[in-house]
Amino acid sequence: MEGLTALAAGLAVFTGVGAALGMGMAISKAAESIARQPEASGKITTITILGAALIEATAIYGFVTALLLIFSK
C-alpha cells in the first residue's frame, strides 16, 4: 500500500471521531430535554434514535471508503 493511500484511508476512518462527537452531543441534549420535559420523552427519543442512525451511517461510509481505498488497486 502506498503512503498516500494509507493517509487517505486514515483520514476516511477519522470520520468516526466526528460521528462519535456528534452522537455524544445529541444524546446529551436529548437527556437534558427529557429532564426538562418528561412528558415529551417519546418524541424526543424517536428523533434522537433517527438522528443517531444518520450519524452512525456517516461513520460507516467513512469506514467503507477506507476499506475500498486499502483493498482496491
Image (cartoon, rainbow, N blue to C red):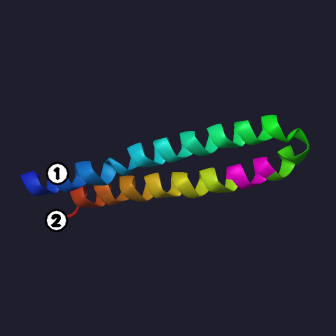
Of tags 1 and 2, the one toward the viewer is 1
Q: Residue at x 45, y 54 (%)?
A: 60
Based on the picture, tell me whether residue 46 belongs to the magenta stretch: yes
> Is there any visible trace of residue 2 in the rendered image?
no
Q: Which amino acid does the dot numbered 1 rest on?
A: Leu
Relative to 71, 15 lies left or right: right
Q: Which residue carries the number 2 mark?
A: 73
Q: Residue 4: x percent and y percent?
A: 10, 56
The quarter of the picture where the C terminus appears is bottom left
Q: Residue 68: x percent and y percent?
A: 29, 60
The image's mark for residue 7 is 1
Based on the picture, tell me whether residue 26 belongs to the magenta stretch: no
Residue 50: name its quadrant. bottom right
Residue 47: name its quadrant. bottom right
Magenta residues span: 44-49
Relative to 34, 60 lies left or right: left
Q: Residue at x 8, y 51 (%)?
A: 3
Q: Residue at x 53, y 51 (%)?
A: 56
Relative to 1, 44 lies left or right: right
Q: Is residue 22 above or below residue 54?
A: above
Which is nearer the eye, 2 or 50? 50
Which is nearer the eye, 58 or 44? 44
